Amino acid sequence: MKILFDLLPVIFFFAAYKTAGFFPDEAHALVTKWLAEGIPADQAPILIATFITIVATALQIGIVWLKHRKVDRMLWISLIVITILGGATLAFHNPKFIQWKPTALYWMFGLILFGSNLIFRRNLIRRMLEGQIRLPDPIWLRLNLAWALFFVILGTLNLYVAYRFSEEVWVNFKLFGCTALVFVFAIAQGLYLSKHLIEDNADNANH
């Protein structure tokens, strides 16, 4: 359930884009009424989807605040990025701004993970997970660097798809491709860590 909630803005983006594509005349009339006359009809789905995503992200933060009375910093960062880049897409009628949004977030996550460890000696992955699992110090470092590198690669891959393939392919990749890659990487990490968890537990038993 939490996974679906975390993916809420992406799911809304995908649903809005596809729905607008099914009703092109109505979608075009809507954006010309809300934004400006003369907007090409083929831009209507991405513009509507962008607006819906901004609203969905704000709604997501509102729900989290009402439930927990605090909001994770990453959610605020996500709202700021989607508002700036999504707002630029709506203002200039240019989908490239919103297509940069996943890359901006992924690169930012990678930079935060790498920079916090390099500069402040804080392993953020360890801080998030050490309450659930125990690992040797070198493995925590590898895990943090692996996720940082993964986010950099994923952000680069997003740009490759955005600039080399059609807009519709990118929309499909944004939901299904990126989500699948995160799951596959997480599973691979789990398999790798399980070996070290077993060794760590065995060492503790011997002592």
Image (cartoon, grey):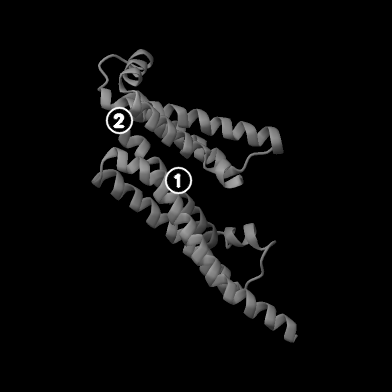
Q: Amino acid at mark 2?
A: Asn
Does residue 206 appear in this view? Answer: yes
Residue at 56% x, 40% y: name it: 75
Q: Earlier in the sequence, mark 1 or mark 2?
A: 2
Reply above or below: 141 against 172.
Answer: below
Residue at 33% x, 43% y: name it: 170
Task: Find numbered disc 2 in the image and state the secondary structure of the residue it sits on.
Answer: loop
Q: CA distance from mark 1 to mark 2?
A: 19 Å
Reply above or below: 127 against 78.
Answer: below
x then y, percent, for residue 160? 29, 50
Residue count near mark 2 (Cα–Cα under 10 Å), binned few <14, some 14–19, many ≥20? some
Residue at 53% x, 60% y: name it: 119
User: The C terminus appears in which quarter of the rendering?
Assistant: bottom right
How many numbered badges does the structure rendering display?
Answer: 2
Residue 5 located left or right of residue 145: right
Residue 187 located left or right of residue 66: left
Residue count near mark 1 (Cα–Cα under 10 Å), binned few <14, some 14–19, many ≥20? some
x then y, percent, for residue 190? 55, 66
Does residue 87 appear in this view? Answer: no
Using the rendered view, name the quadrant where residue 72 is placed: top right
Q: Nearer the viewer, residue 149 or 184?
A: 184
Using the rendered view, name the quadrant where residue 137 is placed: bottom right
x then y, percent, for residue 155? 38, 51
Determine whether label 1 and label 2 are within 8 Å by CB. Answer: no
User: The N terminus appears in which quarter of the rendering?
Assistant: top right
- Residue corresponding to mark 1: 105
Task: Find numbered disc 1 in the image and state the secondary structure of the residue it sits on.
Answer: helix
- Residue corresponding to mark 2: 94
Residue 118 located left or right of residue 161: right
Reply above or below: 47 against 96.
Answer: above
Q: Amino acid at mark 1?
A: Leu
x then y, percent, for residue 105? 45, 45
